[in-house]
Image (spheres, helix red, strand yellow):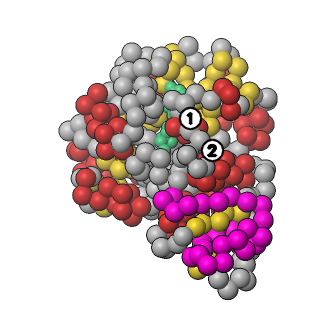
Amino acid sequence: MITKNIELAIQVLNEDNLVAIPTETVYGLAGNAFSESAVHQIFELKNRPLHNPLIVHIHSIDYLSKVAKEIPDKAYQLAKAFWPGPLTLVLNKKDTIPDVVSAQKNTVAVRVPNHPLLLELLANIDFPIAAPSANPFGSISPTSAMHVANYFGDELEIILDGGECEKGIESTIIGFDGEDPVLYRMGSISIEDIKKEIGDLQLITKNDINPEAPGMLSKHYAPKTKMYLTNHVHELIQNFNHQKIGVLLFEKNLSEQHIKHQEILSATGNLNEAAKNLYAAMHRLDHSNLDIIVAERLPDIGLGKTINDKLERASKKE
Ligand code: AMP
Ligand code: MG
């Protein structure tokens, strides 16, 4: 059921069952982070491998010391700068968080989300919630209650409707090597903005990538329709004259007659707007009965970098 009724959602969470929740990034599939049984249900419903850890959502920075320990100064600095907001910190875990949440790691990923409905919900429960994105493992993340309903219609008692997600892409994830910050996943906060706050940080390179981090798996965020990513959409689609083609473009339409469906991410060339529209556009393309989707690479700055990263993973062969 899609509803705005927070009391109902709280009741379901208190019974150790799952609720889909709105956040400013994407919709989440939430359960009591202190309850092993609730967390197991999340993995099952998403069909997510148990070695992929979940993000824990807390109401405020004051709650941080209940779930994490040995918190580096720069973690506090980042939390103060960006919370509530789309920044996830990977920190040493306290025993209050069951190992299933963190996939047996001794670290926990945690953030304070910035969505009024979700903050109200968190203020009225006495546990944090574990919530990965509310989509089957590997598929396109949901940015509206309808997207969640399309994936999990009958299997979820409650989908809490908080409207369209304001940011539209996942949180930026930062971990620590001792005191030194490390970027684990590009997301809604640009690397440039993070660096403005804390100076330089290591970027995890492909060889360092831990396969246990799904946001970093090479194939992820993927539509069912075959997708290509290119700097030159016009040239590439000439190879597919006899197919039903959909295109995902940054700011300008193409005039080719044989394109069946076009999506423009931001007519004004605004990267924030493009990020917000990205997954909804991918959902529409994937439901348009196409043979292929050709996506245009965005400018490689700010959130353009994050969007290109998602598009690369969405268009990976396997
Ligand atoms: P999702 O909420 O579906 O976007 O996925 C959660 C993301 O957080 C994944 O990319 C996880 O790998 C990452 N994550 C959660 N916990 C940890 C952790 N302890 N260490 C590293 N990454 C983590
Ligand atoms: Mg996800």
x, y percentage for residue 307? 66, 53
Name which residue lies at 39% across and 39% down. 48
Name which residue lies at 66% across and 78% down. 241
Residue 241 as seen in the image, left or right of residue 23: right
Q: CA distance from mark 2 to mark 1?
A: 10 Å
Residue 315 or 276: which is nearer the viewer? 315
x, y percentage for residue 147? 41, 61
User: Which residue sits furthest bottom?
Assistant: 257
Residue 148 or 190: which is nearer the viewer? 148
- Can you say which quadrant of the picture contains the N terminus? bottom left
Which residue in the structure is indicated by mark 1?
Answer: 88
- Quarter assignment of residue 49: top left
Image position of 204 with respect to 85: above or below:
above
User: Which residue sits furthest left?
Assistant: 15
Q: Looking at the image, do the residues carrying marks 2 and 1 touch, with CB atoms under 8 Å apart?
A: yes
Element type at marker 2? Answer: loop
Is residue 238 found inside the magenta-colored segment of the image? yes
x, y percentage for residue 110? 50, 31
The magenta span reads 223-249
Look at the numbered disc 1 and say if its residue's Cβ is closer than 8 Å to ligand 1. yes
Name which residue lies at 41% across and 50% down. 135
**Residue 202 in sight here:** yes
Residue 229 or 25: which is nearer the viewer? 229
- Quarter assignment of residue 243: bottom right
Is residue 204 found inside the magenta-colored segment of the image? no
Which residue in the structure is indicated by mark 2?
Answer: 187
Residue 57 as seen in the image, left or right of residue 10: right
**Residue 24 in sight here:** no
Earlier-in-chain disc, 2 versus 1? 1
